[in-house]
Image: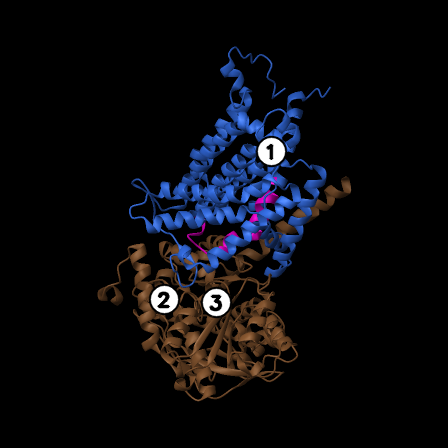
Amino acid sequence: MRVRNALLAAVVMTAGFSSSLTTPVFAQEQEQFFPLLVFRTGPYAPSGVPWANGFVDYYKLVNARGGINGVKAVWEECETSYATDRGVECYERLKGKNGGATLFQTMSTGITFALTEKAPGDKIPILTPGYGRSDSADGGVFEWNFPLTGTHAASADTQLQYVASLVGGLDKLQGKKITLLYHDSPYGKEAIPILQKRAEMHGFDLSMIPVTHPGVEQKSAWLQIRQNRPDFVLLWGWGVMNSTALKEAQATGFPRDKIVGVWPSGSESDVKGISGAEGYSAVLLQPGSGPDSQVVKDILELVHAKGEGTGPKEEVGEAVYMRGVVNAMLSVEGVRAAQEKFGVGKTVTGEQARWGYEHLDLTQEKLDALGFHDVMREVKTSCADHMGSSWARAYVWDGTRWKLASDTWFQADMSILDPLVKTSADAYAAEKKLERRRADDCQS
Amino acid sequence: MFYRENGQLKTSYQADQQIFPIAQDRWAIIGLVLFAIVAVPLLANEYTFSAILIPFLILSLAALGVNILVGYCGQISMGSGAFMAVGAYAAYNTLVRIDGMPLLLALLSGGFFATVVGMFFGIPSLRVKGLYLAVATLAAQFLSDWAFLRVPWFTNNSTSGSVMVSELQMFSWRIDTAVEKYLFCLGFLIVFAVLAKNLVRSAIGREWMAVRDMDVAAAVIGIRITYAKLSAFAVSSFIIGVAGALWGFVHLGAWEPAAFGLDRSFQLLFIVIIGGMGSIMGSFFGAAFIVILPIVLSQTLPALGNLVGFEVSTAAISHAEFMIFGALIVWFLIVEPHGLAKLWSTGKQKLRLWPFPH
């Protein structure tokens, strides 16, 4: 008993010492808080871990480069396991910490839906670069949502354009059979309206096969595909669903070069170590895989070389990792834009950051200076357009790395996307009895 | 010493039949309810409300429903998540499709439709028992997963399959802040807890318990088995349905079928088993254990790690959380197989005798 008490006392003592030693160091610095809703466990961890690592490494890089005009980036992770209720709990936990959250990046379409209802009340913007709800590109209704660099609808459209380029043009799609194999969640379903619209326009036959969460059971789906013999399979998987799909494709004998994925299905973790994945291609909304880019070199040099890297060094530059880097970069650049209006070198509030994301103007020169040359292209947002751009490129897996299928940059056809987005946003506004923002509101 | 009923003489049937015949119990419960209504809103912060208390209240309500079916009537059900889903989607549809539908009525209609579905899936209970029934009720789970994912009508043709409700308004009360949401859920919980407590003390509750303990004997003494089992399914699914509607409307705000998946059914079953089968109080203990403990663990583990100068990664916290949580479940079930509610009553017994245990 006495020994135990002594031990306990010792633990409490050291605890007291170490906490008194660590707290006062950063007290005087300006800080900008970036909460992270990550999923490092669960069936989606293969996608979630490198994604989260990219985020953290970039914030470390920002601090190593001297912060955001001297303001230190701080972050805190909260594990959601990709579950909506845990995401809501994390949101509540982090929103008031460290002087208040600048923004939230949900990293999940389901959590985006839940937070879209909560964030406007707390005046915190929500960034969903490349994912989120597609209709939130309409800034006139969704004041606080920013699906920068593209939405799932844009993903679907660019994916289809790539397929068309394989058969020789959109007009050649006539009579083709295309199967959409999708993750049966808000994420996967976001692709459907745009593909249906395209099928109507170009006269191809679209069939849809949902795969239930978490996506490891796909035998019947691939049996259907074998019976149907589609010309192309559009893969909308996530986490373990992707590797399972590729294995099943091999087992069924479906040619891998006829399977085209989207960005959640197109990272190294989805294809590495799967024999027969060669030839599988994916259309990635920016960014793609970028092991040779300047920003990756910087991260390796300024973060990993000092032993402060997050995750294994080999994964730096992988596609989903790069997505984390780009997402973090967008969050930081929005703050920088807001600082130019509200005070350079000062911490900005969530409300001010929202202004920054709405007036984001990342030209190619700015991106190149940040080290994103040949990783992504310019993004310019406005009051009406919260998406900015939707550049995407196609990559082919050659067994060891993702290679560019061609140098073509695809961009979603806004003449098709816009009406769909507007209808959906208007329906949302009507359901919630919201008014569209007026022009003078956009000036502020 | 603290918990003696000496001198509390009951002079009327009414006094003898009240919910808490012992004065200490009565005052403790009244105090607790007053504390929850008055003091908690003053003490707790927004995070505590939104992330801990509201989910706790709603899952307690759901567990109450499950406890009536599993704990009191002895019918093991793994379709609780499905009944929650039916409640949530039915409430959503009545709210969206009928103009001027009041919130309260929409939530109760969620309960009503859950009752209908619950009774339908209760029919197999008339023929099969135990594990076989558990498997039969699983069908409800799979059916609801399928229906709410694939039938666009249920989600009002939402493209993503996710539905949302904001603007909660009851009469002229706009339920905006976390405190108001908390009080709203608390109101539901108090009403349903009192109703449930009275139901299980009444004739029908005794019928349920008789069926649970031995259905053949119950039939011999004249209890209608069909009526008892189906009424248990009905009452239980009603409460679970309302809880499901609250979970969607108040806690999540926007949801997809995954929010009411098989995991939810298991979670509710575990709440009941750990809290104590056949105990209203147990539902609360179980919900507290299952809802609050993981959150507390995920918050304290990094702090503990920091204390000893060790940075715990997010993934490690999550894994440790699962391991500690699992170990605690096993430990509790070994030391107290009748659940936390039994621990509570043992405690009361001890208090009664203290300080002279013989």
Q: Nearer the viewer, residue A184 or A367?
A: A184
Output the letter for the chain in brown: A
Q: Nearer the viewer, residue A310 or B279?
A: B279
Which amino acid type is shown beneath numbered disc 1? Gly
Which amino acid type is shown beneath numbered disc 3? Gly
Percent across and percent down for residue B129 are: 64, 41
Mark toward the viewer: 3 or 2? 3
Give the SS element for disc 1. loop
Residue A29 in sight from this viewpoint: no
The magenta stretch spans which residues?
A: B251-272
| Contact, mark 3 vs mark 1 (Cβ under 8 Å) | no
Percent across and percent down for residue B139 are: 57, 51
The numbered mark at residue B278 is: 1
Report how far apart the C-alphas of labels 3 and 1 lie in the structure.
42 Å
Instruction: Name above or below for residue B186 compared with residue A16.
Output: above
Query: What residue would you read off at disc 2?
Result: A135
Report how far apart the C-alphas of labels 3 and 2 lie in the structure.
15 Å
